[in-house]
Amino acid sequence: MSSVKAVLRTKANINNLYPIAIRVTKDRKASFLYVGQYIKRCQWDRVNNCVKKSHNDALNINQLIFKKLSSANKKLIEAEIDGNYQSVDDIKNKIVNSSGDFFAVSLIYLKRISDRKKFHQLDIEYGRIQVFKEFLNRDKIYFREINIKLIRRFDNFLINKRKISSRTVSYYMIMIRTIFNIAISELLTDAKCYPFGKGRYQIKFPETQKIGLNSDEIKTLETIDDLTKAQDYALSAWLLSFYFAGIRISDVLHLKWKDFVDNRLYYRMGKNKKIVSLQIPDKARRILQKLNRNKDSIFVFKELENIDLENNKILRTRIKTITRNFNRRLEIVAEKAGIDKKISMHIARHSFGNISGDKIPIQILQKLYRHSSVTTTILYQSNFIQKDIDNALEKVLNL
């Protein structure tokens, strides 16, 4: 005879909270399926096997427990009907693997992205799932089949067959890991199958090289002539980004004339929604005066005029197209200026970091970049601060 029951496990995590689990029992042997919720021991009702009403989120957690318990019991009955003897582990596998198809759960993952209206991410993640399906050459695979060996083979496939960079490979692995975590939380697979983490496949991002323009190269761009109207327009966007501490292209395109008040720029960053207030440098003012030809325009740059800003999908596609066009023009500008470095809209941000180097206190740079943590600023600026390293090398070699 077998049974399922909601229980509170006896081993706490580092926060001294205890995990809630569904216990599967047969022949006095038990196995556990974790719900994914942690509570204090005093918050568990041992009589009714549920969370006490005193817990702030008792109703939602108890609904989750009931859902998982009902699902597990249904799968347990189906396993019992089989007729052949099954151990508690066999029954557990029946429960967690009966609907544990990776690509079925990937639909949940994609829907959650769609619900957040992250359509650019949705397109990218859908494409990555299709690449994984291409690698497997099958439309269905259970989570228990996705082991460390298969993950490493996929890693090798991406790098050697698809010619994908190591950094992008890491994003593929994060996608697989996220879908795995959804499956575990939904009781569709066992955490023991998890192929990621210490002693397993570890996701590591390789260091990337950030190269910005130097002061002389910026001056060359500021004084260059013999540009077409389209090339000068793209360069104006690039220089404005640089003059305002490397604001991102999406924020540049969202700039409105009304954002400039009393010799200051006020705008909300698209990435983290933080308010930015910056004094308008003289160089930026001259560009704004050049662009301000149509007094009836709303935006500094015309590309988002008459675009439904509430339609994230259309807006994302539009910004992507504009960025691509600007970058193509900037490549021509760089060639005319005799600059052999890659120039794109994002390089304006790297260029500001490169020139600021160790000249500006890190706390001020944090405010300019609007980073949530000064640690992020330190890590970002470490790509550009080479003075101490160069001096140390010179001292050794200057015999």
Image: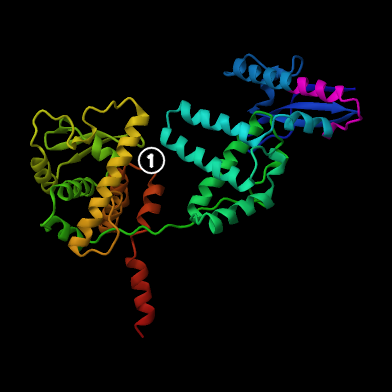
On-image quarter of the N terminus? top right
Q: Is residue 279 left or right of residue 205?
A: left
Q: Does residue 336 show up magenta in the picture? A: no
Residue 108: which quarter of the image? Answer: top right
Relative to 213, residue 259 above or below = above
Pinpoint residue 335: horizontal percent, then vertical percent.
22, 61
Pinpoint residue 330: horizontal percent, then vertical percent.
23, 53
On-image quarter of the C terminus? bottom left
Q: Residue at x 61, y 17 (%)?
A: 58
Residue 21: which quarter of the image? Answer: top right
Badge 1 marks a residue whose secondary structure is: loop
Q: Is residue 309 left or right of residue 189?
A: left
Q: Of residues 393 and 149, which is closer to you in this image? A: 149
Residue type for callout 1: Ser
Pinpoint residue 208: horizontal percent, then vertical percent.
42, 57
Residue 215 visible, this orientation: no
Relative to 313, residue 341 above or below = below
Secondary structure character of the magenta stretch overall: helix
Q: Residue at x 55, y 59 (%)?
A: 160
Q: Of residues 5 and 76, which is closer to you in this image? A: 76
Q: Which residue lies under the disc numbered 1?
A: 372
Residue 281 visible, this orientation: yes
Dot 1: within a 10 Å radius of its alpha carbon, few (fewer than 14), some, or many (20 or more) residues?
Answer: few
Q: Of residues 391 and 76, which is closer to you in this image? A: 76
Q: Is residue 48 left or right of residue 337?
A: right
Q: Of residues 69 and 47, which is closer to you in this image? A: 69
Relative to 334, residue 236 above or below = above
Q: Residue at x 35, y 37 (%)?
A: 271
First to last magenta residue range: 72-89
Pinpoint residue 348: horizontal percent, then vertical percent.
26, 51
Q: Does residue 75 show up magenta in the picture? A: yes
